[in-house]
């Protein structure tokens, strides 16, 4: 077992020359394939072509007792289809209603932008999206995984009315006369084999809050973790020790200490004794960054929803689309 002094010495070496040497010897630059765009479009077409039976399966067994009142314009299958199309097209709710004049002409259903917005706070739709996500993972055979996780931010433009709420959450912001910019944080855990997200969490407070929500969701999926790679931000002993029995790869913080149990000490020993082998596994975490870039290219980097529950639903819809695309990769 290594000493605390040895770990700190290795961290200094990593900063001074080891990391640069590793990148020179082992890193490679991704080449732009002329067939990439064709493959990308092919996956989109396959996802859209095959989504209907998946939607039917996701909504088939959902039965919610309705209170008395005006009957819904759309059934659950139509709602789920509509929110997925809205996310893919990326138009504003008002612009989307103009397109729906064409899409729903055959059904004789009048859809307003408010109808679309309400989908993002509809409990039935949330349940159906979750079902769809789990069905896709099961169809791909995702059950025991080597994984990586990281967080990203989606830009939110919020009007003056919402300032007090964001201030209460202590968000960093830039104020203009009538608008301010804040971020919705998303943490997602990716299966390295399928490149699908197995769980996610969102927060207007912090990356760590989003991470905690993702870990809570992971417990409910039944998916087992063989190995996990996490950013330095999540390298606290308390976080690391939650993965006892699994392989976990992280870069220790500079103020690292050893008095946190055998599992913690064993992970630090691996880092010191086989640094390049350890880094090779750790940097598979870059798949998360690549995944976020791909998601934002396809589905956009802004979120137009303002309520926290609707922001979360928007991000869940993005997660489902990503998994749909990679179902056919």
Image (cartoon, helix red, strand yellow):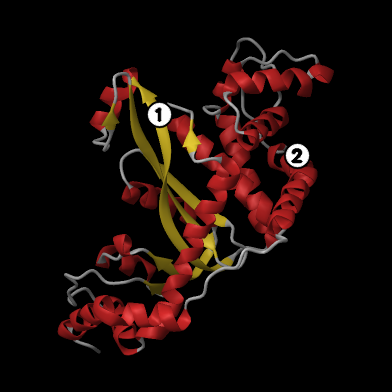
Along the viewing direction, whichever of 259 and 30 lies nearer the viewer: 30
**What residue do we see at 48% from left, 34% from top?**
303
Q: Residues within 10 Å of mark 2 (few under 14, many from 20)?
A: some
Could you tell me if residue 135 is visible in this image? no
Judged from the image, the secondary structure of the residue bearing numbered disc 1 is strand
Q: Which residue is mark 2?
A: 56
State which quarter of the image contains the N terminus. Answer: bottom left
Question: Percent position (x, y) of residue 34?
Answer: 70, 61
**What residue do we see at 71% from left, 22% from top?**
99
Judged from the image, the secondary structure of the residue bearing numbered disc 2 is helix
Along the viewing direction, whichever of 35 and 116 lies nearer the viewer: 35
Q: Which residue is mark 1?
A: 157
Question: Percent position (x, y) of residue 212?
Answer: 36, 51
Location of residue 153 with respect to 31 vertically, above or below: above
Place residue 10 in its image quadrant: bottom left
Question: Percent position (x, y) of residue 137?
Answer: 64, 56
**What residue do we see at 61% from left, 10% from top?**
69
For marks 1 and 2, give the one nearer the viewer: 1
Looking at the image, do the residues carrying marks 1 and 2 touch, with CB atoms under 8 Å apart? no
Q: Is residue 269 left or right of residue 8?
A: right
- The extreme top residue here reads 70
Real-space Cα distance between discs 1 and 2? 35 Å
Location of residue 268 with respect to 230 vertically, above or below: below
Q: Earlier in the sequence, mark 1 or mark 2?
A: 2
**What residue do we see at 41% from left, 77% from top?**
23
Question: Percent position (x, y) of residue 230?
Answer: 39, 65
Q: Residues within 10 Å of mark 1 (few under 14, many from 20)?
A: some
Location of residue 79 with respect to 196 vertically, above or below: above
Q: Is residue 44 left or right of residue 315?
A: right
């Amino acid at each position: 077992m290594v000493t605390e002094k040895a770990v700190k010495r290795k961290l200094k070496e990593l900063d001074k020359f080891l990391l640069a040497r590793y990148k020179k010897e082992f890193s490679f630059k991704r080449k732009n394939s002329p067939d990439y765009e064709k493959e990308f479009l092919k996956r989109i077409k396959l996802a859209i072509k095959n989504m209907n039976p998946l939607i039917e399966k996701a909504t088939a067994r959902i039965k919610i007792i309705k209170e008395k009142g005006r009957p819904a314009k759309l059934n659950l299958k139509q709602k789920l289809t509509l929110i997925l199309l809205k996310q893919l097209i990326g138009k504003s709710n008002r612009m989307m209603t103009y397109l729906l004049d064409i899409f729903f002409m055959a059904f004789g259903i009048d859809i307003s932008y408010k109808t679309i917005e309400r989908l993002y706070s509809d409990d039935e739709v949330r349940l159906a999206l979750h079902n769809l996500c789990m069905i896709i993972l099961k169809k791909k055979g995702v059950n025991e995984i080597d994984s990586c996780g990281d967080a990203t931010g989606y830009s939110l433009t919020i009007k003056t009315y919402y300032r007090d709420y964001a201030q209460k959450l202590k968000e960093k912001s830039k104020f203009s006369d009538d608008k301010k910019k804040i971020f919705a944080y998303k943490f997602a855990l990716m299966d390295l084999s399928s490149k699908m997200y197995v769980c996610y969490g969102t927060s207007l407070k912090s990356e760590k809050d989003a991470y905690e929500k993702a870990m809570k969701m992971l417990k409910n999926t039944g998916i087992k973790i063989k190995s996990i790679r996490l950013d330095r931000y999540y390298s606290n002993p308390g976080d690391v020790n939650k993965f006892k029995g699994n392989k976990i790869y992280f870069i220790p913080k500079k103020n690292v200490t050893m008095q946190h149990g055998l599992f913690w000490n064993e992970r630090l020993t691996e880092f010191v004794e086989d640094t390049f082998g350890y880094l090779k596994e750790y940097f598979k975490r870059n798949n998360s960054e690549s995944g976020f870039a791909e998601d934002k290219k396809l589905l956009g980097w802004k979120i137009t929803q303002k309520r926290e529950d609707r922001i979360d639903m928007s991000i869940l819809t993005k997660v489902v689309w990503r998994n749909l695309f990679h179902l056919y990769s």
